[in-house]
Amino acid sequence: MKEKRRDFIRPMLTIAIVLLSIFVGMKISQINAPKGLQFIMPNNQQDKISLIIDYVKKHYVDSIDMHKIEESIIPDLLKELDPHSVYIPATRMQETNEPLEGNFDGIGVSFNMPNDTVIVINVVQGGPSERAGVLAGDRIITVNDSLIAGVDIDQDSIVHMLRGKSGSKVTVGVKRDNEKKLVSITITRGKIPLKSIDVAYMLTPNIGYIKMTKFARTTHKEFKEVVANLHTLGMKKIILDLRRNTGGLLDQAFEISNEFLPKGKLIVYTEGRASKRKDLYSTGSGACINDSVVILIDEGSASASEILAGAIQDNDRGLIIGRRSFGKGLVQEPISFSDGSGMRLTIARYYTPTGRSIQRAYSNDIDEYYREIYYRMEHGELLSADSIHMDDMLKYTTPGGKTVYGGGGIMPDIFVPYDTTGVNLYFISVSRKNLVYKYAIAFSDEHRKELHEIKDLPSLRAFFKDKNLVERFVNYASKNGVRPIQSEIDECAPIIEVHLRAYIGRSTPLDDEGFYSELNTIDTTVEKAVQELDKMN
């Protein structure tokens, strides 16, 4: 951020010096000033920025890179508007759009670097890497003859090396099991789907759990597919987990809201200074109209997540459980430029059916805006609903008589504090060193063949029987510098075991289902959702 500001300040200082010199010169000696260079502003002061830039182009003493100046000025110009109007350079346009488009060009693996080596955790079924012969557990040592293991290279750089245009090739050297030599594999890159839904499975015989992480072009399609499958398995009630879902496309939030609401219900409306009010109503064609629903939110739920939660809450359609959401109620319009760059400009606010804008207050200090989560933490909001002070002037009433609030995110119907159970000094010590994850990877390597055969949750849970995971982990942590204190170990053992099982579960073909099905066993918000759904018919 500081470097960007310096890049912005230098050209602006140059412009200021040029203008100051002209102004002083005109005042001191207008007789000597060439008549054609007098800097006369229009009376209405219209388009001063373009005038200045044009003047600098024509008259500045040295040749200058105007493209560089523009690239520096435009982001700072948009920062003066609101926190969500942004400029996107051409070099970043593809990576910015990928999450919303629902796919990217790559090789189709998920990997991690618990130490200094890339370990393939899972391979996308039918993807480029699987077709080329890459296996879960492979260590990627080289990429196109460049060594990436045991050297100081960050994960983002490795991702950049592995990604590329569909049809292009990349050769990786992998270390596999006890093979002495690297196995060389050439992979033809292709389109890799980016999932919006991490996991969807039956939590109880009649409650389905769906974890949604974004609202991309494929989200509604994915949602319909998983809902259809869960209905065949007996689902009559849904937990839709939108925690840490930062949003995405407005139309996808509308489509998923429509799945739950009867015909003629207002879902959301947008309105701006230059944008007329636009109301979006449900069609009554949804697949979940008869299902009971609970939506989970937290301080990371934003934008499209808040549209969906607001539509369900304001129409008295279901319960919202968790903690106050982020509070982003601004609508951006994407604009593309001929050089490949683009801009997302805020053109309207969106409003929930009761008429509340949930955009929280903001100033020109963007850093301060995004730091609010830390202020919430410091003031105890994540631990106690009593610490949240809502403005009585922003009270609204749903058709069913429930009070809801605007002015700063969606307030849940039922508050569930951040769970600190088992988080003690021992747990913090092993977490800081990332030892839980590192041991889970080591354990998964040791049992790779067995884990590869696990295809369902009962098999996964049977596998964990008599594995003594916590005892083994404590020995591992001791060898890595964390002294065992039995009283603290006893206190945090349940949370350590569940995290170990979750990471190991993700190393099976179950992938995220193996991960979340374990974590949800100690998730107090999910537990509360189940309790509330059990009360519903």
Image: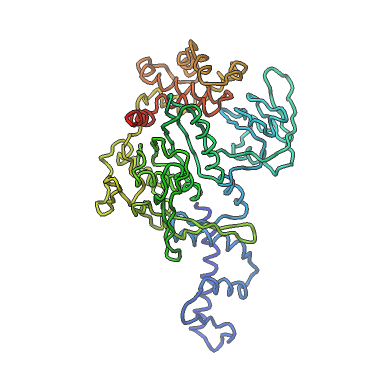
Chosen colour scheme: rainbow
Looking at the rendering, which quadrant does residue 511 occupy? top right
Give the percent coordinates (x, y) of residue 253.
47, 46
Looking at the rendering, which quadrant does residue 57 occupy? bottom right
45 with respect to 143 (left or right): left
Give the percent coordinates (x, y) of residue 19.
52, 74
Residue in front for this viewpoint, 347 or 155? 347
Q: Residue at x 53, y 31 (%)?
A: 229
Q: Residue at x 53, y 39 (%)?
A: 196
Q: Residue at x 39, y 35 (%)?
A: 292
Above or below for 428 versus 413? above
334 with respect to 485 (left or right): right
Q: How many marks?
A: 0
Give the percent coordinates (x, y) of residue 171.
74, 34
Residue in front for this viewpoint, 328 or 56? 328
Q: Quadrant of the C terminus?
A: top left
Residue situated furthest bottom in the rendering = 31
Residue in front for this viewpoint, 3 or 213? 213
Above or below for 488 versus 101? above
Give the percent coordinates (x, y) of residue 153.
62, 36
Above or below for 122 versus 286? above
Residue in front for this viewpoint, 235 or 118? 235
441 with respect to 44 (left or right): right
